[in-house]
């Protein structure tokens, strides 16, 4: 039930560790062991977020920058952090050299994501030396990892602030402590917090918006760090989600993307109502916003009711991102995905039958511990059978603390690379075929801006999320345009204006 609780939104000062040998005494590191626990307590929703009076204006005349890595969830969290900083009076800096606060909103999903951040933290040391008042903060999923916090303490002492994914609402007080105490402030909660509504947001652009529908993940796929960094599954109340989408529609946004690590588990944590993702979409479908997307769908919780609702179309676009991870039932079992190849293919069959022009995309991991050549070939054959429009493909990266990190990994690195290459060849070939099928067809494009490479060219996306370039007037940005496809490439479509659609 919705209740209020002052305790967790309390902005009382935290005790900061001194940058001395006292670390061990004050420092409470994140704990993967605690992060793994799933308590039964009810999640509370707080509607009383406010910037403490004494902190209003502390950012006046100062500038901030946020570097964001990782998934849409992180991008949206950065919009919230920007919102909080702007409420404090900060404005956005154009370059690191002029910033008073730089936050690194990090991603822990694969080793190379982490390496990138450590590289940046090394580079920024020079700027900190030139500007000792600069506050450097590390937040996001990496902060939730014990090993990362340990490494920052040891090798990146110029970092001023570390906070996690569960206490973003405490940014004002954490920043103040970092500013005035000149001590490294570390506050990472290993147990997820409650849901905090009404945090300010500075959204990127006025056309498309992210909307969280749930937080956390309880799936514990054996390779994945997210359930540890994001805590247990917690759904926002439907009325809060719906109110946000209505408000975005009123403000003139043309598209929303509903966010969750596993949106199909939406509502499973409600104890007072029986209300799932299908119900939510059925309501959002009736809101006057032209396009509604969602990500990510876990195949296991994709039920018939949801398919039925999606088949109603309208503002619910025909694009489903349905990560499969592997085409081998044995590997899927080792990954604890809790479905088989057959179950996945059956789901795809049902979706295609209900939504004939559906665009399916996926995520695939190659080189999972013990993956044999035959098992990898099962992935290739599944990809062909489904006929994805595109796929994100990854080489397995062991994540400390996850069960897969302890599995024997006998697949040599060059074999993994080879498999990724072979998979990408196939995926690209399928993408091109799918795009070629759109040749000479007229598609509806939501125009998002001018092309990065040619200012005379506009770019936008189809309902199926395909990128389209065409020559047009910038006044069309933010509108829907009918475009006839004249050239289909692997990753982009090119076309010319057919007619403008009145919306
Ligand atoms: N919640 C989403 C995925 C979020 S992570 C889902 O379950 O679909 C995005 C993708 O990163 C995953 O789908 C997976 O393909 C990949 N990934 C996650 N952990 C990984 C790891 N340890 N190594 C390589 N890829 C990984
Ligand atoms: Fe990770 Fe699996 Fe959860 Fe996705 S569903 S975030 S892959 S544990
Ligand atoms: Fe990365 Fe965290 Fe998202 S690990 S993929 S930023 S949930």
Image (spheres, grey):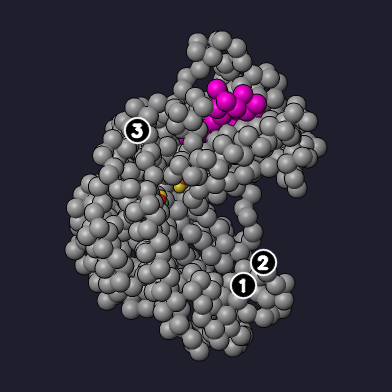
Query: Which residue in the protein does label 3 denote?
Result: 401
Work out whether residue 44 or residue 88 is closer to the camera in this orientation and state it.
Answer: 88
Mark 2 element type: loop
Q: CA distance from mark 2 to mark 1?
A: 9 Å
Between discs 2 and 1, the one toward the N terminus: 2
Dot 3: within a 10 Å radius of its alpha carbon, few (fewer than 14), some, or many (20 or more) residues? some
Tell me which residue sits at (35%, 27%) in the image.
34
Query: Which residue in the protein does label 1 denote?
Result: 459
Q: CA distance from mark 2 to mark 3?
A: 40 Å
Magenta stretch: includes residue 245: no
Question: Above or below — where is 324 with respect to 25?
Answer: below
The answer to whether marks 2 and 1 mark residues whose Cβ atoms lie closer than 8 Å is yes
Tell me which residue sits at (70%, 25%) in the image.
179
Q: Position of residue 318 (x, y in %)?
A: 40, 72
The answer to whether mark 1 is within 8 Å of ligand 1 is no
Which-is-in-front pick, marks 1 and 3?
Answer: 3
Q: CA distance from mark 1 to mark 3?
A: 42 Å
Mark 3 element type: loop
Mark 1 element type: strand
Work out whether residue 1 or residue 395 is closer to the camera in this orientation and state it.
Answer: 395
- In magenta, the rendered stretch is 152-175
Query: Which residue in the protein does label 2 denote?
Result: 452
């Amino acid at each position: 039930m919705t209740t209020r609780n002052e305790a967790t939104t309390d902005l009382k000062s935290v005790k900061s560790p001194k940058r001395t040998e006292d670390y061990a005494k004050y420092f409470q590191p994140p704990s993967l062991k605690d992060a793994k626990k799933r308590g039964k307590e009810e999640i509370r929703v707080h509607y009383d977020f406010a910037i403490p009076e004494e902190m209003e204006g502390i950012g006046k005349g100062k500038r901030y920058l946020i570097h964001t890595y990782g998934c849409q969830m992180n991008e949206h969290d950065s919009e919230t952090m920007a919102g909080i900083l702007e409420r404090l009076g900060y404005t956005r800096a154009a370059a690191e050299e002029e910033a008073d606060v730089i936050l690194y909103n990090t991603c822990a999903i694969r080793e190379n994501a982490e390496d990138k951040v450590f590289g940046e933290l090394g580079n920024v040391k020079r700027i900190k030396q030139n500007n000792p008042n600069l506050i450097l903060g590390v937040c996001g999923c990496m902060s939730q990892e014990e090993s990362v916090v340990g490494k920052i303490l040891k090798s990146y002492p110029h970092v001023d602030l570390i906070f996690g994914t569960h206490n973003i609402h405490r940014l004002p007080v954490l920043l103040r402590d970092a500013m005035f105490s000149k001590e490294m402030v570390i506050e990472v909660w290993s147990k997820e917090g409650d849901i905090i509504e009404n945090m300010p947001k500075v959204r990127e652009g006025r056309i498309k918006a992210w909307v969280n529908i749930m937080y956390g993940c309880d799936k514990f796929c054996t390779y994945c760090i997210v359930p540890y960094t994001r805590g247990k599954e917690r759904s926002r109340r439907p009325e809060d989600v719906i109110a946000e989408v209505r408000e975005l529609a009123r403000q003139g946004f043309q598209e929303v993307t509903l966010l969750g690590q596993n949106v199909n588990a939406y509502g499973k944590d409600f104890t007072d109502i029986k209300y799932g993702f299908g119900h939510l979409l059925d309501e959002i479908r009736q809101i006057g916003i032209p396009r509604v997307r969602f990500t990510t769908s876990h195949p296991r919780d994709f039920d018939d009711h949801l398919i039925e609702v999606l088949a109603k179309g309208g503002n619910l676009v025909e694009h489903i991102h349905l990560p499969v991870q592997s085409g081998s039932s044995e590997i899927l079992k080792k990954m604890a995905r809790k479905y088989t190849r057959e179950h996945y293919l059956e789901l795809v069959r049902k979706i295609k039958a209900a939504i004939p022009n559906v665009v399916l995309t996926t995520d695939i991991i190659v080189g999972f511990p013990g993956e044999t050549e035959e098992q990898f070939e099962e992935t290739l054959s599944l990809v062909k059978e489904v006929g994805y429009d595109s796929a994100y493909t990854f080489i397995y990266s062991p994540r400390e603390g996850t069960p897969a990190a302890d599995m024997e990994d006998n697949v040599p690195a060059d074999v993994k690379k080879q498999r990724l290459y072979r998979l990408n060849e196939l995926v690209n070939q399928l993408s091109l075929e799918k795009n070629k099928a759109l040749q000479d067809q007229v598609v509806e494009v939501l125009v998002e801006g001018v092309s990065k490479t040619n200012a005379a060219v506009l770019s936008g996306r189809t309902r199926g999320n395909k990128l389209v370039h065409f020559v047009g007037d910038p006044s069309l940005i933010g509108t829907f345009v009918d475009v006839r496809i004249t050239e289909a490439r692997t990753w982009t479509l090119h076309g010319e204006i057919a007619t403008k659609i009145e919306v």
